Image: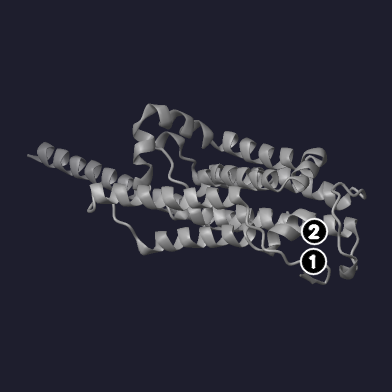
């Protein structure tokens, strides 16, 4: 079945089906077993389940609908639409679905705490994600993923999973020794998107078709226009970074104001103590 030359085919990848099933099973079992052990200390909130269901629905939408077939065979902009939405929306939903106590075993065991702290360090997390995304989109490597459907899904899952690390310094539960200040979070959000923005500008303004997509003639767009549209879409995460930085800025200002108020109260208390001491000393001298 086709629509405007687009293949409306429902593609069920065994690899992605197994990966999503393992994700659902692992999340459900871990959540239930840990909650069952200490139900009062580890409550399960409805909003966390809702966040997880949202992440699963987004993943299913982009892996198991005709979007996937179109993204792999006909439109590069569909592929970028697929990748951007997984990274920008599904990944944060999955992080928000995890209560803080879910990571207690990770932080308690040195064998898991050390690599987890390393991978969620801002510089490491950003480098791992951007390197993964850019290496998969080297034209020779990307062309091979278009030929092999399972390899294409391996690419998408690796980008999605490393994007969880990329989001972690901003919205994930951080170990006290790993926690960024509000200015640090803003600086991280500002710098993190540069590699992808540069890549987006290259594919928009290169003037060369880098990816061999069979764009349907019925759409009246060429392969380069498809590529340029994909590059423009890739700038969306940069806009999201600006949106993230806005509340961080106001929280930073509120933190500065709160600190200033505490300092004023402390200074006032010290001043009152000093004045009281001076009065007592003066009274003693008078006596």
Secondary structure found at label 2? loop
Does residue 275 appear to the left or right of 114 in the view shown?
Answer: left
Residue at the outermost bottom position? 3
Look at mark 1 in the image and give the residue it sits on.
6
Does residue 5 appear to the left or right of 24 in the view shown?
Answer: right
> Residue at (48%, 48%) from the top-left corner?
22
Does residue 72 appear to the left or right of 23 in the view shown?
Answer: right
Q: Where residue 18 sits: x, y (%)?
A: 53, 49
> Residue at (74%, 48%) from the top-left corner?
197
Q: Where residue 36 sits: x, y (%)?
A: 25, 51
Is residue 187 placed above or below 116 in the rendered structure? below
Q: Is residue 69 visible?
A: yes
> Residue at (67%, 39%) from the top-left corner?
132
Secondary structure found at label 1? strand
Does residue 113 appear to the left or right of 89 in the view shown?
Answer: left
Nearer the observer, 34 or 195:
34
Q: Is residue 233 visible?
A: no
Q: Where residue 163 sits: x, y (%)?
A: 59, 46
Residue at the outermost left position? 287
Dot 1 or dot 2: first in sequence order is 1
Q: Classify mark 2: residues with Cα within 10 Å, few (<14), some (14-19) or many (20+).
A: many
Is residue 107 placed above or below 30 in the rendered structure? above
Look at mark 2 in the image and give the residue it sits on.
75
Q: Where residue 247 sits: x, y (%)?
A: 53, 57
Contact between labelled residues 2 and 1, with CB atoms less than 8 Å apart? yes
> Residue at (51%, 47%) from the top-left corner?
182
């Amino acid at each position: 079945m086709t629509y405007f030359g687009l293949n409306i085919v429902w593609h069920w990848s065994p690899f992605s089906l197994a990966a999503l099933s393992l994700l659902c099973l692992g999340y459900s079992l871990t959540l239930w077993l840990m909650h069952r052990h200490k139900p009062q200390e580890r409550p399960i909130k409805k909003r966390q389940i809702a966040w997880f269901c949202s992440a699963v629905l987004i993943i299913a939408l982009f892996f198991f609908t005709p979007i996937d077939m179109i993204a792999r065979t006909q439109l590069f902009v569909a592929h970028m639409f697929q990748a951007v939405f997984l990274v920008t929306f599904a990944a944060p939903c999955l992080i928000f679905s995890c209560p803080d106590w879910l990571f207690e075993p990770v932080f308690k065991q040195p064998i898991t705490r050390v690599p987890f702290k390393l991978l969620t360090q801002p510089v490491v997390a950003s480098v791992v994600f951007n390197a993964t995304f850019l290496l998969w989109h080297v034209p020779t490597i990307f062309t091979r993923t278009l030929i092999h459907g399972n390899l294409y899904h391996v690419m998408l899952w690796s980008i999605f999973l490393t994007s969880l690390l990329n989001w972690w310094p901003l919205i994930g539960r951080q170990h006290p020794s790993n926690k960024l200040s509000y200015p640090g979070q803003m600086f991280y959000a500002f710098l993190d998107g540069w590699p992808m923005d540069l890549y987006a500008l290259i594919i928009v303004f290169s003037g060369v078709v880098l990816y061999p997509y069979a764009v349907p003639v019925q759409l009246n767009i060429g392969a380069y226009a498809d590529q340029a549209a994909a590059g423009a879409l890739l700038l969306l995460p940069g806009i999201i970074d600006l949106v993230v930085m806005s509340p961080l800025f106001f929280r930073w200002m509120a933190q500065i104001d709160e600190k200033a108020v505490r300092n004023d109260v402390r200074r006032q208390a010290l001043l009152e103590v000093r004045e009281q001491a001076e009065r007592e000393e003066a009274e003693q001298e008078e006596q």
